Image (tube, rainbow, N blue to C red):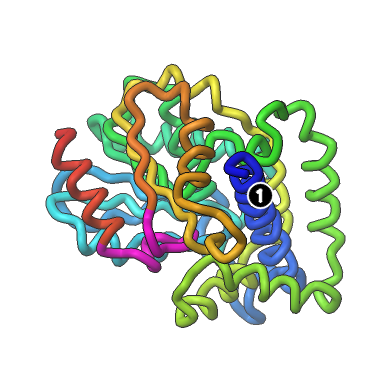
Amino acid sequence: MKMMLAMYYAMKALARLAMLGMAMAVLGSGAAHAAGAAPAGTGKVQVEVVGHGRPLLMIPGLNSSAEVWRETCRALKEVQCHLVQLPGFAGARAADPRPADFLSAMRDQLLAYVHDQKLDHPAVIGHSLGGVLTLQMAVKEPDALGPLVIVDSLPFYAGMQNPQATARSVQPMAEQMRTAMLAADPASYQAQAEAALAPLTNSTARLPELKRWGRDSDRATTADAMYSLLVTDLRSEVAGIRSPTLVLGAWASYQAMGATEASARAIFQSQYAALPGVRIELSATGHHFLMWDDPQWLRGQVQAFLDSHR
């Protein structure tokens, strides 16, 4: 029974990721940006620096704005926040030409930023897709970064449903999903899109913001990012990460479906089994956007972790 619940949670979590991508694609399937408004930025990663102290790179998730981290930034002590805006998301100009692989291109731009700004072992926090980027950065350059905080993200999303899956085995499904997202009829999927967004946060006040970010995101970028995420498997590669790592997970949105904290923790522990010294903590109440849903818990976890790894 425990295994069945774990697998059920895994399938629902993967569905959440897929539906988020479809929802964002549908909501943004008309004009990529608001009428009369030019997309912001240069088509590359943009970073806003806020405050003084220890550098903390803050990476948002799929179709999210850098604004998702602003309140957390203000609450943390003795940090200099580097708020990241990924291209093509939430009104930022999309990359042109489109990168062959979204995640690896973003990883390399973020590492280049760390070196160009001469950041000395910055701490990094990443949410969802941003968590995967954080892991990728630490895998590629294990000596460049300080402590890592991964927020509701896993090394291989597609492996939740089937631990035996590989990046190669899920590639056809991922390609089909990308094609479907690019071809989706907004009129047919509008209701499904809005329903898919609701479980991502327990704060109904935030839903209009999520919908706006989706509408303002570039559809092709969203589809490429989803494809890249599904075919990226870091489960064994995280063994090379040398930074202390804290993983903060969410499970409460699936409690009504039979998921338990134990079944959720089992999935996180399995996916991060190769990461030396990883610490996994689960919120009792927060949904996917933990920085909004359980802010005091998240901020306390992050502050204590950073303070213990100076």
Q: Which sits in the foreground, 186 or 92?
A: 186
Residue 40: image location, x then y, percent: 52, 64
Residue 118: image location, x then y, percent: 27, 32
Q: Which sits in the foreground, 287 or 185?
A: 287
Q: Residue at x 13, y 50 (%)?
A: 78
**Magenta includes 93?**
no
Would you call the spot at circle 1 few (<14 residues within 10 Å), some (14-19), or many (20 or more)? some
Q: Residue at x 45, y 54 (%)?
A: 250
Which quarter of the rendered picture does the C terminus lie within?
A: top left
**In terms of image quadrants, where is residue 259?**
bottom right
Q: Residue at x 71, y 43 (%)?
A: 227
Is the residue 199 above or below the residue 258 in the image? below
Residue 301 appears left or right of 258: left
**Magenta includes 284?**
yes
Is the residue 92 above or below the residue 243 in the image? below
Residue 258: image location, x then y, percent: 59, 58
Is the residue 128 above or below the residue 295 in the image? above
Mark 1, secondary structure of its residue: helix
- Residue 167, can we see it? yes
Q: Which residue is mark 1?
A: 8
Report the magenta residues as a range: 283-296
**In terms of image quadrants, where is residue 105?**
top right
Q: Which sits in the foreground, 148 or 11?
A: 11
